[in-house]
Image: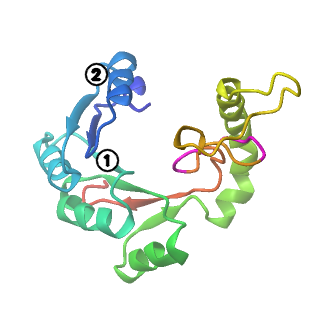
Amino acid sequence: MQAVHGFKVSSVELLPMPEVSRALRETAPSVAIVDGDGRQLVQAIARRRGAAERVAVIFDGEKRQTAYETFRSIKGHLTLGVFDDTNLDRGAFPLLLRNREEVAWHTWDCSFLRAHNDSRILEPYSHALRRQVLRAVPRDPNSGEPIVRTSAIYKAIDQQGRPIFHGGMEDLSRFHLSIVQGGVWG
């Protein structure tokens, strides 16, 4: 999405999925797709940027503490780092950031949630995603109800016939992120 708004984007995938890479190339041809170990590749990409470029890294594959170590190794080259799913692990990641005296902001910040009510904002997207997936689910010809199967291909459908997505996409408001100030903020 950032590439659509004019940002230079590199996407690093440890285990690329061919259909996702193909779709990314078609919809955002300006995105540099790099496959391999993000701990090494993200460092190389961040260090190659020009001195006048403001660089941000969104950590979505590497998670929390592991991603933070990569962030620390290139913090001097970054404006900010964004860490996904940071409300998990009973608050260990925000505590790590606080203990390391990082300047950070979290999307579950109470004043932000009161002002934005993200579940209300994201619900139409979650609902549309559920609707699209349910169109592809086989239906009982008599009742019209989703057919629940236990084979691997249908494990993405729960007992009520609702889609279950890897990463929680069926409920976009459940997962939050943290933004951490880099070394070249100003």
Q: Is residue 165 magenta?
A: yes
Q: From the viewer's perspective, is residue 119 above or below residue 149?
A: below
Label 2 residue SS: loop
The amino acid on which the numbered mark 1 sits, given as a three-letter code, is: Ala
Q: From the viewer's perspective, is residue 30 above or below residue 127?
A: above
Nearest the eye: 132 or 108: 132
Q: Residue at x 20, y 49 (%)?
A: 42
Residue 59 is situated, as x and y percent measured from the top left of the image, at 35, 53
Residue 98 is situated, as x and y percent measured from the top left of the image, at 43, 79
Residue 185 is situated, as x and y percent measured from the top left of the image, at 31, 55
Disc 2 marks which residue?
A: 30
Q: Give the main secondary structure, helix, strand or loop, of the magenta stretch.
A: loop
Q: Residue at x 54, y 38 (%)?
A: 153
Q: Residue at x 39, y 61 (%)?
A: 180
Nearest the eye: 44 or 149: 149
The amino acid on which the numbered mark 2 sits, given as a three-letter code, is: Ser
Q: Residue at x 29, y 27 (%)?
A: 31
Q: Which numbered circle lies on residue 11? A: none
- Indicate the quadrant containing the N terminus: top left, top right, bottom left or bottom right: top left
Foreground mark, 1 or 2, reads 2
- How many numbered markers are drawn? 2
120 to the left or right of 184: right
Q: CA distance from mark 1 to mark 2?
A: 17 Å
The residues colored magenta run 160-167
Nearest the eye: 33 or 76: 33
Q: Which numbered circle lies on residue 56? A: 1
> Which quadrant of the view contains residue 76?
bottom left
Label 1 residue SS: strand
149 to the left or right of 6: right
